[in-house]
């Protein structure tokens, strides 16, 4: 495991970008899930016996939690909606990997899901930790402060000292928000990948008021999360040809906005998520 993830250079459409390589921290626990779960990773084994969480069945946060729980020898139970037989049969993807790391899954009926998830919080014992969907939690702050310190240190090097802007895509917005709060001297660009900007702002404001240096770029087109778009696959392929693979859910929209709406030097914080690409590429193959 890297102590400090390096910064690589990438040229896209004739423009130089810098990439904070959080994708290569660990095969299961990488990207922003590593940063967001940093506090949990530092927690002594005997603090808990069990971790529970909930959300989508191909979630990157789910896989990261499964990896931590295996490492800590904590039981890990994940609540999700009914899983399709197709996903169950796949021998790749986050669900498959997480099962192999010892995750237990509880499938909930669609109409019971919300109520059941709310009730989880009420029946916790002291040895059990509940982690909200996607790891959207004020605990994420510590890990992102560590990331901020690394960036600040690395930016002292001459080759990076001209960079004034940083970018990373948003789901819950936890990563972008805490990064912006930890690095007030830099502009932080993000895009909403789940819902629109208004929804993203509400999610962020539940954690902290939004600082001035955090700029939410509005995608040109309304993209729905986990849907397939030709321009997403196209930019994914271009980036891969330039030397670095990015995820197919969040990164494409961030890159399209960066290319379309910014012109200065940008450090892109790689948010990981490559373990989900196999199933996404499989879906693209069968598209149309
Ligand atoms: C989870 C995730 C995000 C979104 O992170 P938030 O902190 O929820 O905004 C972005 N990119 C990848 C690859 C992710 O797995």
Image: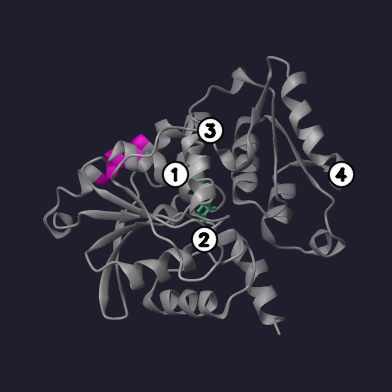
Toward which corner of the image does residue 128 lie, by quadrant? top right
Above or below, 16 relative to 249: below
In three-dimensional space, the C-alpha distance between marks 4 and 1, rounded to whole angstroms, equals: 31 Å
On the image, the x and y values in percent for residue 45 come to 59, 23
Could you classify mark 3 by the number of other residues whose Cα lies within 10 Å: few (under 14), some (14-19), or many (20 or more)? some
In three-dimensional space, the C-alpha distance between marks 2 and 4, rounded to whole angstroms, equals: 28 Å
Q: Secondary structure at mark 3?
A: loop
Above or below, 224 relative to 181: below
Toward which corner of the image does residue 64 lie, by quadrant? top right
State the residue at coordinates (69%, 48%): 98
On the image, the x and y values in percent for residue 248 come to 55, 67
In three-dimensional space, the C-alpha distance between marks 1 and 2, rounded to whole angstroms, equals: 13 Å
Find disc 4 in the rendering and name its residue.
111
Say if mark 2 contacts mark 4, CB within 8 Å.
Answer: no
Find disc 3 in the rendering and name its residue.
137
Find disc 1 in the rendering and name its residue.
175
On the image, the x and y values in percent for residue 247 come to 52, 64
Above or below, 202 relative to 13: above
**Residue 252 in view, yes or no:** yes
Mark 2 CB near ligand 1 (8 Å cut): yes
State the residue at coordinates (65%, 41%): 66
Mark 4 CB near ligand 1 (8 Å cut): no
Say if mark 3 contacts mark 4, CB within 8 Å.
Answer: no
> Horizontal placement of 82 versus 135: left or right?
right
Q: Secondary structure at mark 4?
A: helix
Mark 1 CB near ligand 1 (8 Å cut): yes
> Which range of residues does the magenta coloring cover?
145-151
Find disc 2 in the rendering and name its residue.
250
């Amino acid at each position: 495991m890297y102590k400090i993830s390096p910064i690589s250079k990438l040229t896209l459409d004739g423009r130089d970008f810098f990439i904070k390589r959080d994708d290569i921290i660990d095969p299961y626990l990488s990207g922003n899930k590593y940063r967001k779960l940093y506090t949990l990773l530092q927690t002594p084994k005997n603090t808990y016996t069990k971790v529970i969480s909930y959300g989508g069945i191909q979630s990157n946060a789910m896989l990261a939690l499964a990896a931590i729980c295996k490492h800590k020898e904590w039981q890990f139970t994940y609540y999700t909606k009914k899983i399709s037989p197709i996903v169950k049969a796949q021998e790749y993807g986050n669900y498959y990997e997480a099962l192999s790391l010892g995750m237990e899954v509880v499938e909930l009926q669609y109409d019971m899901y919300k109520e059941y998830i709310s009730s989880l919080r009420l029946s916790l014992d002291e040895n059990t930790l509940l982690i909200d969907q996607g790891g959207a939690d004020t605990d994420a702050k510590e890990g992102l402060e560590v990331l901020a310190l690394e960036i600040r240190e690395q930016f002292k090097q001459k080759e990076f000292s001209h960079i004034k802007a940083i970018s990373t895509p948003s789901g819950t917005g936890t990563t972008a928000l805490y990064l912006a709060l930890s690095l007030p001297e830099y502009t932080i660009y993000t895009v909403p990948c789940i819902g629109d900007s208004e929804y993203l702002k509400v999610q962020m404001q539940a954690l902290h008021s939004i600082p001035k240096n955090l700029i939410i770029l509005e995608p040109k087109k309304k993209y729905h999360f986990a849907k397939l778009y030709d321009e997403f696959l196209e930019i994914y392929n271009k980036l891969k040809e330039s030397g670095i693979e990015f995820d197919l859910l969040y990164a494409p929209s961030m890159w399209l906005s960066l290319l379309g709406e910014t012109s200065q030097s940008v450090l892109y914080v790689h948010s990981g998520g490559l373990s989900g690409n196999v199933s996404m590429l499989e879906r693209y193959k069968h598209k149309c």
